[in-house]
Image (spheres, helix red, strand yellow):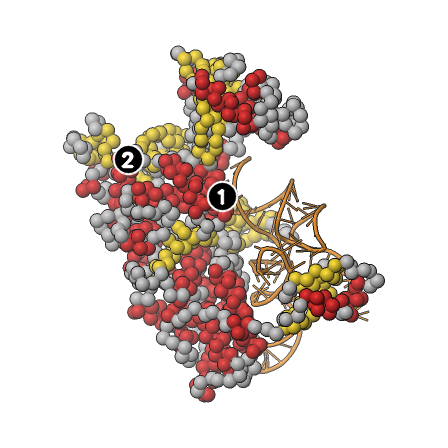
Amino acid sequence: MNETYEPQSIERDARQFWEQQHSFRVSEDRGKRKFYCLSMFPYPSGKLHMGHVRNYTIGDVLTRHYRMRGYNVLQPMGWDAFGLPAENAAMANKVPPAKWTRDNIAYMKKQLQGLGFALDWSRELATCDASYYKWNQWLFTRLFRKGLAYKKTGVVNWDPVDQTVLANEQVIEGRGWRTGAPVEKREIPMYFLKITAYAEDLLKSLDDLPGWPEQVKLMQKNWIGRSEGVRIGFPYELEGKKILWVFTTRADTLMGATFMAVAAEHPIAVFASQKNAKLKSFVDECRRGPAMEAELAQIEKKGMATGLYATHPVSGKKIPVWVGNYVLMAYGEGAVMGVPAHDERDYAFATQYGLPIAPVIRHPLGDTVPAPWKPAYADYGVCINSGPYDGLDYQAAVTKIASDLKAKGLGEKQVQWRLRDWGISRQRYWGCPIPIVHCASCGDVPVPDDQLPVKLPEHLVPDGTGNPLAKMPQFYEAKCPSCARPAKRETDTMDTFVDSSWYFARFACPDQDQAMVDQRAQYWMAVDQYIGGIEHAILHLLYSRFFTRAMRDEGLLPGMAEPFTNLLTQGMVLADSYFTDEGGRREWIHPSEIEVQKDAKGKVLSARTTDGRNVVYDGIGTMSKSKNNGVDPQALIDQYGADTARFFIIFASPPTNTLEWSDEGVEGSYRFLRRLWTFASRYAKRKAALGKLAGKPGKGARFEIHSVLKQANYDLQKLQFNTVASAAMKILNALERLPEEETAAEEEGMSILIRLLAPITPHVAHHLWRALGFGEDVMRAPWPEPDPAALEQDEVELVVQVNGVKRGTLRVPKSADQGAVEAMVQSLEFVKKYVGDKIIKRVVVVPGRLINVVA
RNA sequence: GCCUGGGUGGUGAAACUGGUAGACACAGGGGACUUAAAAUCCCCAGGCCGCAAGGCCGUGCAGGUUCAAAUCCUGCCCCGGGCACCA
């Protein structure tokens, strides 16, 4: 065995071995327990970044661990290949997105292979391949026929200069990123998927996911947002009798409603603004406002009276109807009743516009609501000033009000969801075409199966002014599938989240060209362990849960509801980001090209590029293509090898922690592997000289090694891999300390150490396992388990505290009973010293750990 | 703004879910080997006071519960993620 650790050559050899043996190619094997381990597939942005390395290393540690435990493990890889960055790159480089994307895939595939992941590459897929997206289209047509996909208007960001729709990411402080023009809101026809049809199921089933982090389940629960309340009608006159409907969870405050507020898009607002120029300009202003909720929620709350009045359904009083820029058309009825006495936002609104405030609920501070607003005003309490409802508590009031309204046809109890249907239309080129043909006489006709896929032309280069498909007659000119007359093909493509909502099922049978999935999916699904960034906690995971149900209801995944049994949400890898802001356009500068001045607390004072330009520090955040702050792991891999890179990223932090990237410490990981190598080569020499190593068992070392192993196995189960890496270091430390004659313990320890490392640093483990004569393939070796006999001890050391402060320790026989221990402790000199002449009130004994003498 | 996490030495972190705070490492300091450097090996190391023995303080901040709090409770500060067209 070579005396120096040469990662490049041993890694090449190991990978060759796995390739020749087809070590990671798997098929359905009913004789073994299956384990489907999946990391979220990457967007082929160009190069791997640290987040990828972290994600796939975590997945690989699990994959290899479960293999060694005897499972039939599937770990596939593919490419989330449609998306916006390819179009941006196309514009910048005048290269078609298809070419850019496929080049990136080829490069990143090499990088992944260089990291030695135990992937079944025979299942590779890319969402931009027609053989994949055909089935997006096929499923869409099925959902369309069922009414689960339908058309309505949706809101988009519109750049008036480029005449194009912008993604939220392309809107910077309300302006288009390329033109700097103020962005407008536009309503256009779009296709929606009816995820709300599954709202109840998606919510309830969260309880059936014990393998998901509570955090994610809670976020999804709040996102779906079930609320129970009352739908209430306020009659009004406008070219005849009409009813203004609102939904409220606080129907008990109905008698305190002093105004109504409607969204700018609400029919009342639109009608009233026709005759009122001032109102029209306000409504127009609101309609132009931000489309993004985060911005909408932070703009100044404004309103204007419509001049119209609605009738209170109980008191019969006239109530003014206002337009409010904070009322969302997309949520509920697009209108709310204003109860300023018991709702903070309504209170602020009423105060600002001089609207009456009428307390109708007794709250802990009394029966009035003097300024300023206090949270207690929104508390539940009994009704006051509420006529027939006085004295009723929340439940009783809501029930009575709902039944009174029902009798008048002006309301009833209702369940409301925050979840909205999923708009999937994108006015973009690089995506999956929506398979619809618009016919003047037949309407929107889904493309029949025998005409699928609707292929995306791959040679186009977008220019930033709208979707090139819409300018290409060869694409959009079509025949109506039902009447054969000339018709127009839909030119919008699908949201890329559609592609990623079912790829996990396709990995079971990527070669199936007659169906979306086949019976092999029933063997492999559900994914036993899914791993990916916490940023996907809501959208991607919820859409995937929805798709799994939709596919089940198409008969594709019988009996399946939840796609991911266990979920590990990896923390993000963060890096600082900087931009120059010249002429309103941001140019993001890579952190490696920045010189930073920091204050004593490490806060950035100023930053400039190495060539002297001033830059704006944008804070620390997730590594992304758009902020140009990704760290390329390739340099690390080239310098130290894949095993060091893998070991380091696992060792640096527990998988769920966010990680502020720094490569300080890489040296330590490399040093460890070198030390392991040196130790192993000395061991090999001695073994060759002595024949079989058989000497003293080494009781102390065995206790240490098996204790560490026991903890490591527990940590693996908890998915806390950083301490497993530490455990490997501890075992090597123990082996190095081992006296020469304890050779049996050494041999056992070595065998444990290599197997423990195999999932993290597979190449060096593979090599050492063979070189030291333990076997052919460490991947086929059994996972090490601690020996209970090695863990047995005659004595234990207890911590002795006096009044909760540690003062010493005490060794006692394991069998000693509590009374004997108490007596021993009280006779200890240092205990007597700290107790002094005080009386011992109590002695707390925690068996096997600690004694606290309370005086 | 709303939803959701996090904050422990100079740094990454550990702490068997209430029981010795800082395991294992990085950076640092000292030493050995070497003509020298690299590599390797040994030792030191939370802060303050002290020659030392030892003492006090210490897990973002301020309180609280407990024999005992990084861990539980209340309030506050800072940072990350998501907010439906980045993926």
Residue A498 appears in view: no
Left of A763 or right of it: where is A726? right
Q: Secondary structure at mark 1?
A: helix
Position of residue A818 measured from the top left corner of the image (x, y, whole percent): 68, 65
Q: Chain of mark 2?
A: A
Q: Secondary structure at mark 2?
A: helix
**Badge 2 density bin: few <14, some 14–19, many ≥20, Cα 10 Å:** few
* Mark 1, residue position: A218
Q: Name the residue located 53 percent from the left edge and 74 percent from the top edge.
A: A789
Q: Are marks 1 and 2 in contact (CB under 8 Å)?
A: no
**In this view, A1 is above or below A201:** below
Left of A366 or right of it: where is A826? right
Q: Quadrant of residue A178?
A: top left
- Please name the amino acid that badge 2 sits on: Lys
Position of residue A471 measured from the top left corner of the image (x, y, whole percent): 26, 36
Q: Name the residue located 50 percent from the left edge and 79 percent from the top edge.
A: A746
Foreground residue among A468 and A842 = A842
Foreground residue among A501 and A395 = A395
Position of residue A488 measured from the top left corner of the image (x, y, whole percent): 22, 32
Q: Residue furthest right?
A: A837
- Please name the amino acid that badge 1 sits on: Leu
Q: Quadrant of residue A21?
A: bottom left
As drawn, the label of residue A146 is 2
Q: Name the residue located 36 percent from the left edge and 61 percent from the top edge.
A: A33
Q: Is the N terminus of chain A in the top left, top right, bottom left or bottom right quadrant? A: bottom left
